[in-house]
Image: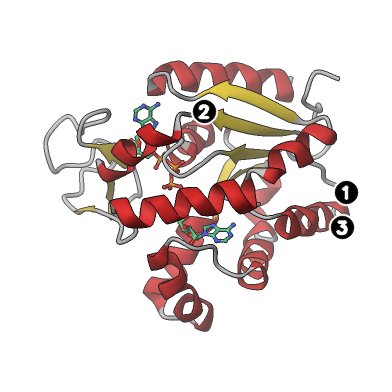
Amino acid sequence: MDGARKPQTPPVLILLGPPGAGKGTQARMLEDQFGLVQLSTGDLLRAAVAFGSKAGKAAKTVMEAGDLVSDDIVIAILRDRLAAPDCAKGVILDGFPRTTAQAEALDQMLGETGQQINAAILLEVDDVKMVVRIAGRFTCGACGEGYHDEFKQPKTAGICDNCGAEQMTRRADDNAKTVMSRLDAYHEQTAPLITYYDDKGVLRRVDAMKDIATIQNALATLTENIMA
Ligand code: AP5
């Protein structure tokens, strides 16, 4: 087994890795390159918080503390989004699953539509360096494009390369204290999924300490091989 399955149904890729590993950055690039749909539970939860829905109100304080939102809430949000027509093109899961219960729920959801996971790609990084990556992050509030003070600056300061908006924002949970809690949550609750997917024969590993373009090339090659 080479660690990935060829898709007979719309592809399902999972990006695994701690906060700051580059899941969002790379998922957006794979979306543009391969026409897959990025499903970020972090983005879906932040939208629910901004909207003020019941799920968003329950999630707000949990996210600000850097803890994981309850499985029930996250699974319900993901299930709804996965059922939307655009996901028939295939999806890249960014930030889901994060617990064994979520991974089992995903297996069940995909089983209902005859789909399966083609690859769970682990972005391998040095944790200590993730604090720097996260502390320097900012995002276009209009289109969601991600930037970094040092590693990925817009061509013109304050203006999004992608959509031209001047609405750069920083996340409420991107501070050193919360990042440490998020890293702890990753090691305690999400890292066991590495074995979960390895046992299923779909785990792939990518060195995510390299520069953004090098990682993008590695992921593009991997995705081409999976989809060929
Ligand atoms: P979420 O939004 O998923 O955050 P996260 O997993 O903590 O991941 P990040 O978005 O911080 O990092 P990333 O890996 O996407 O890195 P990025 O590409 O932005 O979750 C937030 C919260 O929501 C959670 O804490 C939890 O409360 C809740 N939640 C979400 N999903 C949940 C679930 N399934 N269950 C329960 N709760 C859930 O990159 C970071 C920065 O580094 C950027 O500035 C980027 O430009 C830069 N960068 C990227 N790659 C590189 C590189 N190779 N070199 C240098 N810089 C780089």
- Residue highlighted by disc 3: 112
Q: Which residue is found at the position 55% from the left and 67% from the top?
A: 69
For the N terminus, the image quarter is top right
- Residue 166 horizontal side relative to residue 141, left or right: left
Quadrant (top left, top right, bottom left, bottom right) of the C terminus: top right
Q: Secondary structure at mark 1?
A: loop
For badge 1, the amino acid type reads Gly
Q: CA distance from mark 3 to mark 2?
A: 28 Å
In this image, 1 relative to 132: left or right? right
Residue at mark 2: 33
- Of mark 2 and mark 1, the one earlier in the sequence is 2
| Discs 1, 3 touching: Cβ within 8 Å | yes
Q: Of all residues shown, which one is farthest toward the left?
A: 157
For the point 40% across and 51% down, the residue is 180
Contact, CB < 8 Å: mark 3 with mark 2?
Answer: no
Residue type marked 2: Gln
Q: Which residue is mark 1?
A: 114
Q: Position of residue 122 (x, y in %)?
A: 61, 32
Residue 154 x/y as whole percent: 20, 33
Q: Describe the element under mark 3 as helix, strand or loop.
A: helix
Closer to the observer: label 3 or label 2?
3
**What's the residue type where badge 3 is placed?**
Glu
Asked whether, in this view, residue 210 is left or right of residue 188, the answer is left
Q: Position of residue 50 (x, y in %)?
A: 37, 72
Q: Which mark is residue 66?
A: none
Which badge, 3 or 2, is on the more N-terminal residue? 2
